Amino acid sequence: MQIENSPYSSTLPLPTSPTPPQYLSGAITMIPHLLLLVSDWNPQFFRELKGRLKPRNIALTIATSLLVQSAILLYLWAVLPSPTSTYSRYCTSKTDYLLSDCVLDATGNPIINWQIWWSDLFQSLSWLLPFVLLIGGVYLLIGDLAKEERRGTLNFIRLSPRSSQSILIGKLLGVPLIPFLAVVLAIPLHLWSAAQAGISAEEVVSIYLVTGAACCFFYSGSIFYAFLGGAQNWLGAAAVWFSYTIFFQLWQIYQHDSSYYLGLKQWYNLPIGESLSFAVAFAVMNFGIGTFWIWRAINRRFRNPNQTLISKRQSYAMTLCFELLMFGFVFREHHRWDHPIYDLMTMIAFNLVWFLVLIAALTPHRQTLLDWARYRRDGGAAKAKRVWRRSMLRDLVWGEKSPAIGAIALNLFIPVAVFTPWILIWEGADQQIRGFLGLLFCMLFLLICAAIAQSILFMKFQKRAIAAVGVVGALMILPAIAMLTLGVHPDHNPAAWLLSAFAFVAMEFASAPAIAFSFLAHLAIFSLFTLRLTRQLRRAGESELKALMAHRTL
């Protein structure tokens, strides 16, 4: 029997779903509108949002975040002094020692210094939250880009009508969504512990500012690393972990000294370390400058994956910025035990790392060099008025497809030009000669590394970029480690150290003949690799031109 024929159909209403409250219905109707706005603003971010914020991922993230917060609270609660405790960090006492004498109340229980307890909770979260954001975000970004590259979907994304900046911003904001959610859930406890510990709002805001600037820098750097050919996300995360650990150790050492922050005293005689605001502004400024240059590089590579990460013109500006930043720490208040040679050694060590990255980002690959060699060979009959425009020197310094050795040489001239006037005002001719020779040997070694990297990238095998970075990195690090392991120290055997990346540490102990022999050896090695690469390019240009002319005659 059908319901409409029932005599009770007019008196018994059909069951209906309960009507949600008005505020819930308004929120429900707003969700599709917000999703539509997000998809219109950045489709790539919306794609990452849909792929990552699934119920299972959200539930696991919430559970993990709350579990970690509970574990920290339980641990700090467990280390509180008991009635039988004699000494404890959290006891109230008249002494200022780390383990204070426990003063008991009328009931025999120790009087707890809750401000220190809340301060330790705040410090723990201040270390943990940036750690999760940086390590987790870098790991996920490198892994995501490597997966997109393997599947070929990255080239499909490049075909999008959206700008490269919009796509990369969507990646930066969307891929680390899970670490973002975990940290957001811990922020209320972080703020509450700061309030209970009496931490100033300036210090809390400074932590968030520096963390945000560091995330922008390292997230952009992770894309830079992935575009270099690095698919090992654990390696990028380990590098960030190492850097963050050093930063945290410095912060732990200097946080109790109110005279300066993070070991920073002066920069170009500006008292950046005497105020938390100055130190934070300096850190944010440097992170911002680094992010700006990295962002230009990854935008350039995303638009054209066959290009180098940076152009030669950009490399000169980047090197100048880096050298001026490093040089600023020289101008500070010196003590009688300070020697400028140690400042120079520190800057040379940082330059070794900088030029390792620069060589990897500036050196073109095989096909680009083949195109350039054919162009040079085909342009041999150019008219006189075009000779300078197409000259070899101009191509090596400014050309986009030419070998990177000329550009690396010009980049190496920048620190020499910046540091030489400073070296000339040192006291003592011996110190001046030692400093200049140390700088010169470092530049020659880096030129050899550039020639080796370019030769490797011109070979025919897979993963040439990773091999070039690995070989050059090994040349910089392994000889020094091997000599230290075997007991070959610079003061006993300086000649061996003169042939390494750290020749500057042996200049004080090396004789003039040993220095001259090492200098000639550097020149011979560099000439050998350069001549070999020149012959390879000439032969490749001839064969490419013959193949092109044969194709034209057909």
Image: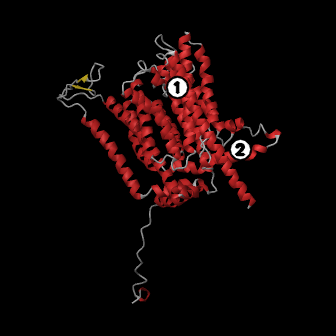
**Residue beneath the point at 50% across and 14% down:** 334
By what rule are the colours in the image chosen?
Answer: secondary structure
- Disc number for residue 376: 2
316 relative position to 146: left or right: right
Residue density around tag 2, few if under 14, some if 14–19, many if 20 or more, within 10 Å = many
Numbered disc 1: secondary structure: helix
Q: Quadrant of the N terminus?
A: bottom left
155 relative position to 538: left or right: left
Q: Quadrant of the C terminus?
A: bottom right
**Residue beneath the point at 44% across and 63% down:** 20
The amino acid on which the numbered mark 2 sits, given as a three-letter code, is: Arg
Q: Is residue 266 visible?
A: no
Question: Where on the picture, by quarter, is residue 490?
Answer: top left
Relative vertical location of residue 24 with respect to residue 372 in this rendering, above or below: below
68 relative position to 550: left or right: left
**Residue beneath the point at 23% across and 30% down:** 81
